[in-house]
Image: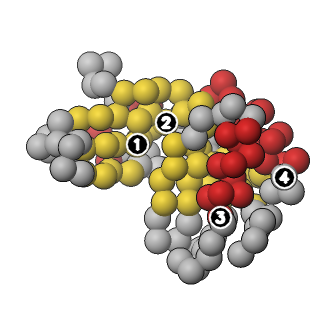
Amino acid sequence: MTNPKLILSLLQETLAICRLDRDAGIPDWALTGGFFSITRTPDELSIVCPQSSVPEEIPCDREWQCLRVEGPLALSLTGILASLAAPLARAGISTFVVSTYDTDYVMVKEKDVEQAILVLSQEGHQVRRRRGG
């Protein structure tokens, strides 16, 4: 797929990206809210979840907003993330991406979300604001 024009939904919850020790158990607070993602690698346990759920002492980066690509998307499609990440990178907007079987979630810092929506709209994507996670 070349230069796909996508529909995205802005999720309401403010998220945090947390890093725990690679051997840490999955904490109960990580399993709350409408959106969470847990990834274990040989180096770390990475958790994305509602910021309001994360205890203060947990190392994390806070104040992220999430744009959900409306799907489901076929796993064989190409260019989906590039069509979002490239214009955001040109605008100096950092991203953090979570992909699932059905779709992709592109997170941007809360301070950048309005600019990100503008940039993506100028690329021909449609961004909807919605309620809930």
Q: Would residue 55 appear left or right of 108 to someone viewing this image? A: left
Crowdedness of circle 2 by 10 Å Cα count: few (<14), some, many (20+)? Answer: many
Q: Would residue 9 appear left or right of 37 to someone viewing this image? A: right
Label 1 residue SS? strand
Alpha carbon distance from label 4 to label 1: 27 Å
Q: Residue beneath label 2, please?
A: 15
Kindly identify the amino acid type of the residue bearing the numbered disc 3: Ile
Say whether marks 2 and 1 touch (CB < 8 Å). yes
The mark tally for this picture is 4
Q: Residue furthest left?
A: 23
Q: Would residue 37 appear left or right of 120 to someone viewing this image? A: left
Q: Residue beneath label 3, please?
A: 80
Q: Which mark is residue 123?
A: 4
Q: Earlier along the polypeptide chain: callout 4 or callout 2?
A: 2
Label 3 residue SS? helix
Crowdedness of circle 4 by 10 Å Cα count: few (<14), some, many (20+)? Answer: some
Q: Kindly identify the residue that appears in the image at 21 percent across and 43 percent down.
A: 43
Image: 78 above or below 14: below
Q: Kindly identify the residue that appears in the image at 84 percent across and 52 percent down.
A: 123
Say whether marks 4 and 2 touch (CB < 8 Å). no
Q: Kindly identify the residue that appears in the image at 32 percent across and 19 percent down.
A: 56
